[in-house]
Amino acid sequence: MSSLDVPREQWATRAGFILAAVGSAVGLGNIWRFPFLTAESGGAVFVLVYLLLVALIGLPVMLVEFVIGRRSERNPIGAFRRLGHPSWKFAGVIGALAGFIILSYYSVVGGWVLQYIVASFSGGYGGDPETFFVETASGTDAIVSHAVFMGLVAGIVALGVRNGLERAAKVMVPSVIVLLVALAGYGATLPNANEGYQFYLNPDVSTFASDAVSILPAAAGQAFFTLSLGMGVMITYSSYLGEDRNLLNDSLIIVAIDTFIALLAGLVAFPFLASQGVDLETGGGGAGAVFISLATAFESMPAGHLVGGVFFIMLAIAALSSAFSILEVVVSFVIDTFDVGRVPATVGITAVIFVVGIPTAIDLNYLDAYDLFANNILLIVGGLVLSIFIGWIYAPNALEELGQGRTGDGAFDAYWINVVRFVVPIVLLYTVYLAVVEYVEFIQGTFL
Ligand code: PHE
């Protein structure tokens, strides 16, 4: 109990919070998942819907999490108790469950990145990037690298070496941007680059309305995933935030950096996919799309293996800082709920998550099964519940909290609370409905 009386430890600098939040947001979601989902979901229309959702839903929901975190100075489980509404802590349970499932396959993909680092520095991708990916993605190597990745994340969480991670994020973000810009420049010189850009950037307005509905769950899931929303990560990070900080400014910076990196990754992936003859119109590529096209690029460019090695190291740092934020939420949940110590909790959860991830490392079908459920359903439900809480139960206090650290802007505040009350719940409810229908079909059809 006494910890309640001690002033909450805060981020040492403004950059500390932004770096940690950006470290969580920027990861495999931007560089692997975004291009691959765009390829699978029809290209430019998907990109447009995703961008709309980031602005219209993602940004307001990020502010919802910031308000809850800074107001309560607690992680998602403790937050609702502290705010006087303990029964809402089920939102934290949804988040912890989502994190648990997401990390199990996130770590498998993180393991692929580790394997690509080793391959880059030890002679390349076997001359055939496609075969190399298949061999990397499933089987013993995939299980071993999944174990190594989980071990690294657990080490960071158990030792509490978050500072090191923040310093790494400081190097990672600019490096990733520089590397992606360079690769995009190289991609622009490829023979069929234009086809790739067409697919990626030129939406077909005539079918937009009907396409938009069918891709809504995927685009919403991606918006939440890439911004680390719906799980309570941003609640936790903002719980260390001082009252003098401008939440709106910070959220704009985080969303802008995250979105910029995703769009850049697309500018790299699509010219390469097109020039490799991948049939984009039929959704070609799959989960391996980005890995295969990047490896092909590194294979063909001057000093490519060195550039590839550096690129995959940066990607691993990006993935680790995201995975860290997920494990942190799950571990805090278990510590608070079952009253166990940090180290045993971390070790135990890591072991279970490792086991849960093994099917993904054997059969890529599980990636979809886990990902669709945790992402398109659980994260969205999490965001929905948090928004209803702020919009309908806690609005006056939330508005006061949002206004702290900012010279007032009544117009934005009114816009925000109305979006949180009406637009977010309506859009997300509809999204969840579509996602559940889609999931049932997927399980009955493709999966079983
Ligand atoms: N945002 C991270 C990424 O894009 C993944 C993530 C999802 C992290 C949910 C935390 C919570 O890679």
Image (cartoon, rainbow, N blue to C red):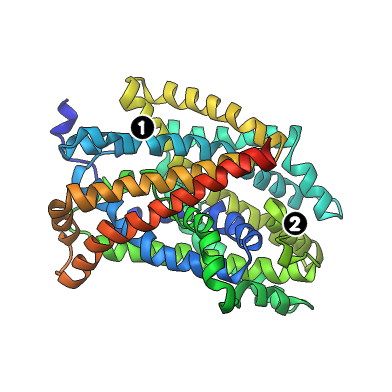
| Depth check, front residue: 107 or 175 | 107
Q: How many marks?
A: 2
| Depth check, front residue: 65 or 119 | 65
Q: Secondary structure beneath disc 1?
A: helix
> Residue 128, percent across and down?
85, 54
Residue 332: image tag: 1
Q: Residue at x 87, y 55 (%)?
A: 127
Q: Is residue 413 left or right of residue 230?
A: left
Q: Residue at x 44, y 49 (%)?
A: 432
Q: Residue at x 52, y 57 (%)?
A: 172
Q: Secondary structure beneath disc 2?
A: helix
Counting residues from the N terminus, which is met first, the one under dot 2 or under dot 1? 2
Is residue 153 among what the camera can see?
A: yes
Q: Quadrant of the C terminus?
A: top right
Q: Quadrant of the N terminus?
A: top left
Q: Which residue lies under the disc numbered 2? A: 292
Contact (CB < 8 A) between labels 2 and 1? no
Q: Is residue 372 above or below residue 261?
A: above
Q: Is residue 59 above or below residue 361?
A: below
> Residue 407, percent across and down?
15, 69
Please state which amino acid type lies under the numbered disc 1. Ser
